[in-house]
Image: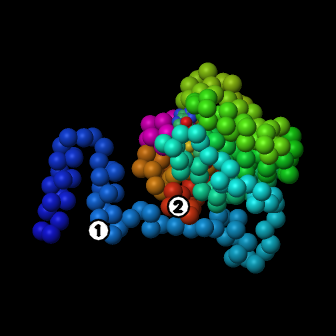
Amino acid sequence: MSNISARLRLLRTALMRRFIYTDIVAMAEQYGLSIRDVCADVEPFEFAALATGSPLSGPDFSVLREADFTAADAYAAGWSSEPSVGRFLGRLAAARRAAVVIELGCFVGWSTAHIALALAKSNPAGRVHYLDYDRRYLDTAGANLRRLGLEAQGQPHQGMSTDPAVQSALPAKADIVFIDTSHDYECTLQEIDHYGARLNPGGCLVLHDSLSASGVRRAVYERKDRFRVATFATERSNGITVLWPQ
Ligand SMILES: C[S@@+](CC[C@H](N)C(=O)[O-])C[C@H]1O[C@@H](n2cnc3c(N)ncnc32)[C@H](O)[C@@H]1O
């Protein structure tokens, strides 16, 4: 009965609000259990290199520094994905010699820059089509690509990932689609269904926050029978999942 007050708090929350996931997480943290305990600092290509003793080939991402990718509003601090996610996306694009990558939710262009850098080295005709509904973030992402001399590798798109007009302006087919938008269950499910159908043979969806965001986790779980699924931990415990159509 030592947790009676926590239980009563949860019951009150459950009666008053529909979404109680954050409250359960907060309560678990009070008891020393945290989803943030899940961590990793090696992305899958680095894991394969470590496991096999092979050298890592591909682009040098050390020219990209997290501190150079900031948003003007403090509210959005921490929205960029972990460095291992950028390296993974870049290496995946290079390894597949991707010609078309779509990024849904580019924010200030941290992950976009990794993909663009990899395309510049592996397939200079390749393009990353980066999307955000917020014009300020889209412009900052564009400015970051220009600063790095990677503008030619990127094509900006403004709007919502689920808007049919936006979808029709994006390439009909893609080798990789990176999904990192609202993390809301319904929206993620729509994104998986719509963009999963746009993949070239051998192509894949990559979803960020597939461990930390309940909406993404649930959407992946709902669609697990339609895809081959690989989920990896990341250094801030957010996680990534790769989906290949069956
Ligand atoms: C977590 S941030 C993206 C981080 C970025 N991909 C990275 O790895 O550094 C999410 C971005 O998605 C945008 N966004 C959220 N929902 C969206 C939607 N449905 N369509 C387009 N953009 C969306 C937000 O404005 C925000 O800039």
Seen at 76% across and 60% down, the residue is 62
Front residue of this view, candidates 77 and 240:
77
Taking 117 as reference, is 239 above or below it? below
Residue 3 picture quarter? bottom left
Q: Position of residue 152 (x, y in %)?
A: 83, 37
Is residue 77 rendered to the left or right of residue 1?
Answer: right
Mark 2 residue CB less than 8 A from any atom of ligand 1: no
Q: Which residue in the protein does label 1 denote?
A: 31
Is residue 199 rendered to the left or right of residue 162?
Answer: right
Write the start and end of the magenta stretch as one range: 182-192
Helix or strand or loop: what does disc 1 sit on? loop
Q: Position of residue 89 (x, y in %)?
A: 69, 53
Amino acid under label 1?
Tyr
Quadrant hosting ligand 1: top right
Q: Position of residue 149 (x, y in %)?
A: 83, 43
Residue 188 is inside the magenta segment: yes
Is residue 157 rendered to the left or right of residue 126?
Answer: left
Seen at 67% across and 70% down, the residue is 47
Q: Position of residue 44 (x, y in %)?
A: 66, 64
Front residue of this view, candidates 150 and 103:
150
For the N terminus, give its image quadrant.
bottom left
Front residue of this view, candidates 62 and 180:
62
Q: CA distance from mark 1 to mark 2?
A: 20 Å
Q: Which mark is residue 236?
A: 2
Looking at marks 1 and 2 on the same chain, the residue that comes earlier in the sequence is marked by: 1
Q: Main secondary structure of the magenta part?
A: helix
